[in-house]
Amino acid sequence: MDFAELYDKFFSKVYNYVRYHVRLAAEADDVTGKVFEAALRGYEGYDAAKGPAQGWLFGIARNAVIDWARNRGRRAEVSLEDAPEPGGSDPQLESALERKEEKALLLEAVAGLDDRARDIIALKFSSGMNNREIAAMTGLGESNVGIIIFRAVKKMQADIEGKRKL
Amino acid sequence: MNEVEQAELFNKELDSLLRDGKSPVFSSDPGALSLAAELARADFSADSLIRESLRERLAGQPGLLESLRALFANNYARAALAAAVLVIALLPLARRHEVAAPGPAATAARPPQAPVHAPALARSAVPPLPPLPAAPAAAVSAGAGGLFASIPMGRLEGVAIKNFPITPAGSGLPMVLAAGREVKLENGSGIVFETGGAVFTLERKVISHDDIFERRVL
């Protein structure tokens, strides 16, 4: 697999992983760009015999997200993009807005998790790695990863249901 | 059913959902699994504004190996690189030869150096050589066509200097060498010049460091 194939195959997954951590789209673009730049620099040294490309790539993505979180400081994250948009009478537009709101709800629910649970949920639903691979990457036990996923999904479910009732 | 068992069952159903894309008909926790299915379907990458531009930018940045491969595909660059490697490899040999046989013999054996033109260097794409160690003045004759040539000694010797090339301020008259005689001095010799306005001595003697440097103890 050459780098262009790797990019095409994993761009969405890496972007989604980053987006679960970095809620602003522009910042997620920035971090994703850094992930693939670092991946390109290290691609010649990547040994497929040592493991699948996704594990290697998501390892880079995790480090990029950690760096981003470290550098973020305490500045407020406010973006017009995240503000609710006014409703329209166009059914297609309304449907698009609903989908956008659903996505925003999901991101909000993920953001409500603690750092470790958020990282595991992001890996589980973006990378395509199973619990064993996630456990190997994060240094946790496989059953522990399973429990964290279960608890995180239940917490998100409660948060989203609470918001939908409002 | 305790939490660990619930988690195990949920993860089995979740893995099945992620693998096959279908929720099981009977689920232990339909609400949680439905949310998990939403998470699995969610794709935020449509929000990305850099997908294509980043791809193009990265495609324009070949890796080190690709860069070298592209370089070696060019015959001109290959020849220039080979020439540069050859020059670098032979340079220590040439230097050693120069150090081993100094003096006139070495000068005779050395081929005349052609003048170096900067545009020629730029065209050759071969990195310029570091400067050679300075040769003794006598080793490079004016006739050899080197970069620097010493003035032939014959022009300095044997002809008496009659007109001193410095004129005293205001007089407008050249200083005239009236007489020059060699005298013995302490630790050497000297020549006494008598000019139209003054008498002075040029000394030639062996000196030590202490004659020109002040010695201090730190």
Image (cartoon, rainbow, N blue to C red):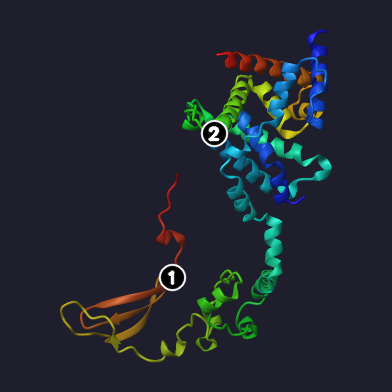
Q: Amino acid at mark 1?
A: Asn
- CA distance separating discs 2 and 1: 107 Å
Q: Position of residue A120 (x, y in %)?
A: 71, 25
Q: Is disc 1 surrounded by few (<14), some (14 to 19) or many (20+) residues within 10 Å?
A: few
Residue A69 at x, y percent in the picture? 58, 29
Residue A156 found in image quarter: top right
SS for dot 2: helix
| Residue that appears at 60% across and 26% down | A102
- The residue at which mark 1 appears reads as B187
> Residue B169 has which mark?
none
Residue B14, located in which quarter of the rendered image? Answer: top right
Give the chain letter at badge 2.
A
Same subunit, labels 2 and 1: the answer reads no
Instruction: Say which residue appears at 78% left-offset and 20% top-offset.
Output: A146
Viewer-side residue, A147 vs A125 = A125
Q: State the residue at coordinates (62%, 84%).
A: B111
In the depicted view, which residue is nearer to us: B161 or B184?
Answer: B161
Query: What residue type is disc 2 on?
Result: Leu
Q: Is residue B161 left or right of residue B196?
A: right
Q: Would you say A141 lies left or right of A154 here?
A: right
Report the side of A79 relative to B114 (left or right): left
- Secondary structure of the residue carrying numbered label 1: loop
Q: Which mark is residue A93?
A: 2
Measured from the top left, where is residue B190 in percent x and y? 38, 77
- What subunit carries mark 1? B
Q: Is residue A142 visible?
A: no
Q: Residue furthest bottom?
A: B159
